[in-house]
Amino acid sequence: MGNSTSTEVFGDESQYKYQAPGPNDSRSPCPALNILANHGYLPRDGKNITPEMLQLLLQEKMGMSWLNVKTVIHKAYKAVGKNGLLSLSDLSYHGLDGLEHDSSLSRLDAALSDNQQDKFNQERFNTFLSFSKDGKFLTTEDVAAARLYFLADSKANNPHFLWNENFKTVTWVETAGLLHILGKDGRISVEDAKVIFEKETFPPGWQKPDSFGVIGTLSAVRALTKAADEHEKQQRIKHDDT
């Protein structure tokens, strides 16, 4: 892990200190983007963001590959971009052609939150943390099980549950990012997860991966879906035994 180009690209890192957002600042359902705004890498008000800004930051600060970033940016600006700009709150758009989705790890579904799906929900997040088997780390297996739980919960309790293959892919890809970009090697500590989701700032000592590209993403997604399949299998066995 390392960030040899960060100083060259962003200059003096001391200018990027954390500041909590104000009441008129724009924030998204995505903690990682909110972190970038809270530290001033993105405009601190979260508004008038260009594709070029996101491309630079997601590659150079977060370690995502060019192709991964290009795919995300194209979809985001196609869905909610306005004259080549977007504000972070625009990403709360809830539609089949968007990126925001139900069954979040830390946000309530749109229909169950009076369209406040961008707002962090502590109770839901605590439920997510409870999937850590050892109480210290959230592993690939833990997070896959949590994903299945929240998906089943939305199906059972949200009469307006919005879901398709696109959202299925988005959830696994963003989960891979949580475990391999904000976390490391397929897991993240519970304490780091709290810092990321509750405070929306970088965990102490965090460094971006050298590169998290298409191959790494596909490998991480395969590991997650395999873990999900195994979890479902074990749940069926338990059910049959009873």
Image (spheres, rainbow, N blue to C red):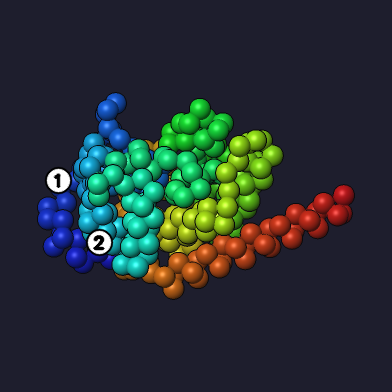
Q: Residue furthest bottom?
A: 215
- Pick the quarter of the image with the N terminus: bottom left
Seen from the viewer's position, the closer of residues 148 and 197 is: 148
Neighbours of disc 1 within 10 Å: few (<14), some (14-19), many (20+):
few
Q: In this view of the protein, which residue sits in the foreground, 140 or 218?
A: 218
Q: Amino acid at mark 1?
A: Gln
What amino acid does circle 2 point to?
Answer: Glu
Q: Quadrant of residue 51?
A: bottom left
Q: Residue at x 12, y 55 (%)?
A: 11
User: Disc 1 vs disc 2: Cβ atoms closer than 8 Å?
Assistant: no
Judging by the rendered image, the residue that carries numbered circle 2 is 60
Left or right: 5 in relation to 139: left
Mark pair 1, 2: CA separation: 17 Å
Residue under pointer 1 = 15
Q: From the viewer's perspective, is 169 left or right of 38?
A: right
Residue at 60% in and 41% down: 161
* Residue 206 x, y percent position in the rendering: 32, 55
Judge whether 28 appears above or below 55 on screen: above
Who comes first in sequence, dot 1 or dot 2? 1
